[in-house]
Image (spheres, rainbow, N blue to C red):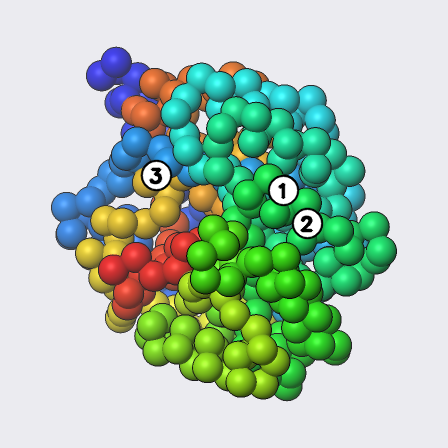
Amino acid sequence: MKSLQATNHQLADSAFQLTVLRQEVADTLHLPLFHEQLRGAGLFPLTPVEPTVLQINVGKMCNQVCRHCHVDAGPDRKEIMTRQTMQYCLDALAQTDIPVVDLTGGAPEMNPDFRWFVEEISRLGRKVLVRCNLTIIVANRKYHDLPDFFKQHGVEVVSSLPFYTAEKTDRQRGNGVFEDSIRALKMLNAVGYGQAGSGLVLNLVYNPAGAFLPGGQKGLQDQFKRVLLKDHGIVFNELFAITNLPVSRYLDYLIESSNYAGYMEKLVNAFNPVAAAGVMCRNTISVGWDGGLYDCDFNQMLDLHVASPVRHIRDFDAAALAQRAIVVNQHCYGCTAGAGSSCGGTVA
């Protein structure tokens, strides 16, 4: 087992060297390398703990084209997870006690086998979390019953809402998105989501619209709850404040607006070892639409596979994956700045 661990660490180092070469813009800034920051904090190589989340990207097709999207999702994307790959995921789950399955996209609901997949995961007794962009619920009549479907299977809904005003939301996600999001939230509330005592969890996600870090999560949550209730009668459970990582469309925005250097310096200067110790890649296994395995959703978008001989879900081996070192690079500063950032909000 020690030799396997050594091999995995060598694979992690090789992957790191490759990604450094691929990020030419980052190299020109002469910023401290992320793995050296981890080393200084006694955290390199970063290693996994017992996995509690299997995060699965079921496809990059989406009804929206958001300017901050790290997936580069949109209506023209053809990458869709097949039912066979979904079955591999179910087979892997059956081998483990991983309690939470986090379904993401794109708009995961646009995968033609989405509902079958949710039903099969539920049969395994696992909690299903769906990252719903809200507007998909009202985009087409075939999606109007999603709130009832979610309720039937006890799905936890996590939805992006950049702000509680139309101006800021539409600027980030497109014209009319705020109005459609409010309609969808009311539909979710109507079947019990976010309502006290219902057991139906509705959480919102906040991403900053510009080249800055999010404010305090608790303060933002209080603002969102107060305004959405007062102006629209909407309730929800928690707000997750997530830092935008310099990946895909958001990276393009930073470079085109000449904000890349300043933003990266903010992330580096805000590096928090406590947040680094609790990053989501330690307890999460990420599965790409084609079944590839990654340490996190961001590494998935950069094509940084796990540093392990086990690189596809059909070959899932929990013991082997537990011996891997997590692949890191400069974008990881986004998850370790300030209070830290994960798919579940701040970590420290």
Of the numbered discs 1 and 3, the one sitting upstream in the chain is 1
Q: Amino acid at mark 2?
A: Asp
Could you say which quadrant of the image residue 250 lies in?
bottom right
Asked if disc 2 and disc 1 are in contact, CB closer than 8 Å, the reply is: yes
Figure quadrant of the C terminus = bottom left
Residue at 83% x, 50% y is 142
Camera-side mark, 1 or 3: 1
Q: Is residue 135 left or right of residue 7?
A: right
Q: On the image, numbered disc 2 is attached to which residue?
A: 148
In the rendered image, is residue 331 in sight? no
Q: On the image, numbered disc 3 is attached to which residue?
A: 283
Nearer to us in this view, 190 or 318: 190
From what the image shows, is residue 109 above or below residue 3?
A: below
Q: Is residue 107 left or right of residue 91?
A: right
Nearer to us in this view, 327 or 31: 327
Nearer to us in this view, 343 or 137: 137
Spatial CA distance of label 2 from label 3 is 30 Å
Find numbered disc 3 in the image and state the secondary structure of the residue it sits on. Answer: loop
Q: Amino acid at mark 3?
A: Asn
Asked if disc 1 and disc 3 are in contact, CB closer than 8 Å, the reply is: no
Camera-side mark, 2 or 3: 2
In the rendered image, is residue 339 in sight? yes
Q: On the image, numbered disc 1 is attached to which residue?
A: 152
Residue at 30% x, 57% y is 347
Give neighbour class at mark 1: few <14, some 14-19, many 20+ (Cα, 10 Å).
Answer: few
Residue at 64% x, 32% y is 119
